[in-house]
Image (cartoon, helix red, strand yellow):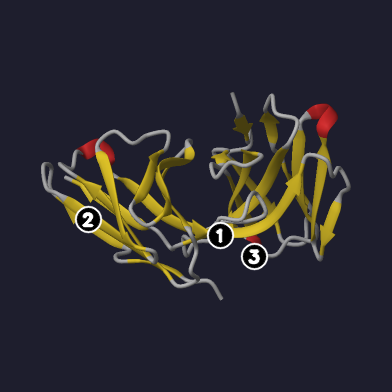
Amino acid sequence: DVKVTQSSRYLVKRTGEKVFLECVQDMDHENMFWYRQDPGLGLRLIYFSYDVKMKEKGDIPEGYSVSREKKERFSLILESASTNQTSMYLCASSFLSGVLYEQYFGPGTRLTVT
Amino acid sequence: AQKVTQAQTEISVVEKEDVTLDCVYETRDTTYYLFWYKQPPSGELVFLIRRNSFDEQNEISGRYSWNFQKSTSSFNFTITASQVVDSAVYFCALTRDSSYKLIFGSGTRLLVRP
């Protein structure tokens, strides 16, 4: 079974703090993704990576950065957390192989910025 | 531009009722893929089905069935004889050919009452 794990289920941080969200997958997937989920908006893509050290911006990259130093690990960084970044963050991974793939998701991290 | 609309924010049914979740999409591409994911209370999205734009055959998997109609740009999901374990948020998603990017609808929360 594919397993995507996220470092924390719940996180509370203060405005201005630097926040690291970690994601690890164990299926040797090339692609990894970070989404945020907000009520009424569904999931929106923040960043994705198709290889180690490679990354591309998604729809809402502002205020975020990412790091992929190893194939299995993809980190989302909030450089200076703000209250409007309070949200559920979901990590996903998939194989690179064309469109014949599905994304496998982690359980999510619910981040509250106070 | 691509867009997915799930007009039903929340549906509540009694166990054993049939329920249909609506999904309407917009795309200018001729080749595209449609997905349904389930998000149970545990948080992680679970892949249910993928359908490509050239395959309009309806699909049935146990109590689940999907109706894809290109003429109305819809990809609806029906649960027959619903069960309490079907309670979850369900997302419809769209991607174009050769793209990693999933466009999600806002989700439909289904509550199945005993």
Label 3 and label 1: CA atoms lie apart by 33 Å
What residue is at 48 percent from the left and 71 percent from the top?
A3
| Comparing labels 3 and 1, the label whose residue is closer to the camera | 1
Label 3 and label 2: CA atoms lie apart by 36 Å
Q: Secondary structure at mark 3?
A: helix
Disc 3: host chain: B
Instruction: Give the residue pinned by disc 2.
Output: A20
Q: Secondary structure at mark 2?
A: strand
Q: Amino acid at mark 3?
A: Val
Q: Residues within 10 Å of mark 2 (few under 14, many from 20)?
A: some
Instruction: Give the residue pinned by disc 1.
Output: A95
Picture coordinates of residue B114, whole percent (x, y):
66, 64
Vertical comparison of B34 with A53: above or below: above
User: Residue at the bottom extreme?
Assistant: A1
Disc 2: host chain: A
Left or right: residue B32 versus residue B104 is: right
Q: Are marks 3 and 2 on the same chain?
A: no
Picture coordinates of residue B58, whole percent (x, y):
87, 49
**The N terminus of chain B: image quadrant:** top right
Instruction: Give the residue pinned by disc 3.
Output: B84
Q: Are marks 2 and 1 on the same chain?
A: yes
